[in-house]
Every structure is written in C-alpha cells, then in structure tokens.
Amino acid sequence: MQAAPVRATAIPSFTTALRAVESLLMSGGQRTARRNAWTSVLEDRRRAKDRIEAQRIVEQTFARRS
C-alpha cells in the first residue's frame, strides 16, 4: 500500500478567495474605500466595547461607595 501523494500547492483560504473575487469585480480605489470602511466599523465596535466596559466599572465603583 502506498501513501497518498502530498499536494504541492496549498488550498487558498476563504479570505484569499474573497480578495481574488473582489479584485476582479472592483477597481483599486473601490477596494481601498471598502477596506477603510470596514476598518472604521471594527474600530467603532472596539470603542463601543471599551465605553461599555468603562461605564460598568464606574457604576460598580459608585455602587461600592453607596
């Protein structure tokens, strides 16, 4: 019995495949704008999470003092 042959090329990840399709469908400027917009969304979510955490800490601090 022989071992299965080893594949020489890696299977592209889902992200890589999406970027390939994106490059076919959009011009470079549109791609950059879309990525910048998504980065802004992620940053807004991070700030919202930080704001909620800070609010929780402040409320706990006031609850302990009361």
Image (cartoon, rainbow, N blue to C red):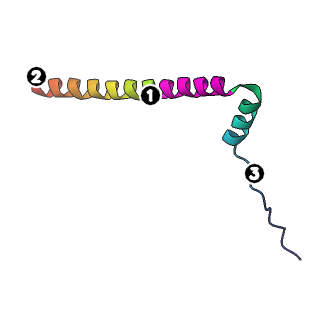
The residue at the far bottom in this view is: 1
* Picture layout, residue 7 above or below residue 58: below
Answer with mark 1 or mark 3, whichever residue precedes in sequence.
3
At x 27%, y 23%, the residue is 55
- Type of residue at label 2? Ser
In the rendered view of the protein, which quadrant contains the N terminus?
A: bottom right
Q: Is residue 51 left or right of residue 35?
A: left
Tag 1 near tag 3, CB within 8 Å: no
Mark 1 — residue?
43
- Dividing the picture into quadrants, the one containing residue 19 is top right
Residue highlighted by disc 3: 11
Give coordinates of residue 6: x percent, y percent: 80, 66
**Residue extent of the magenta highlight:** 28-43
Q: Residues within 10 Å of mark 2 (few under 14, many from 20)?
A: few
Residue 37 part of the magenta-drawn span? yes
> Label 1 vs label 3: CA separation?
31 Å
Are discs 2 and 1 less than 8 Å apart at CB? no
Q: Earlier in the sequence, mark 2 or mark 1?
A: 1
The alpha-carbon separation of the residues under discs 3 and 2 comes to: 60 Å
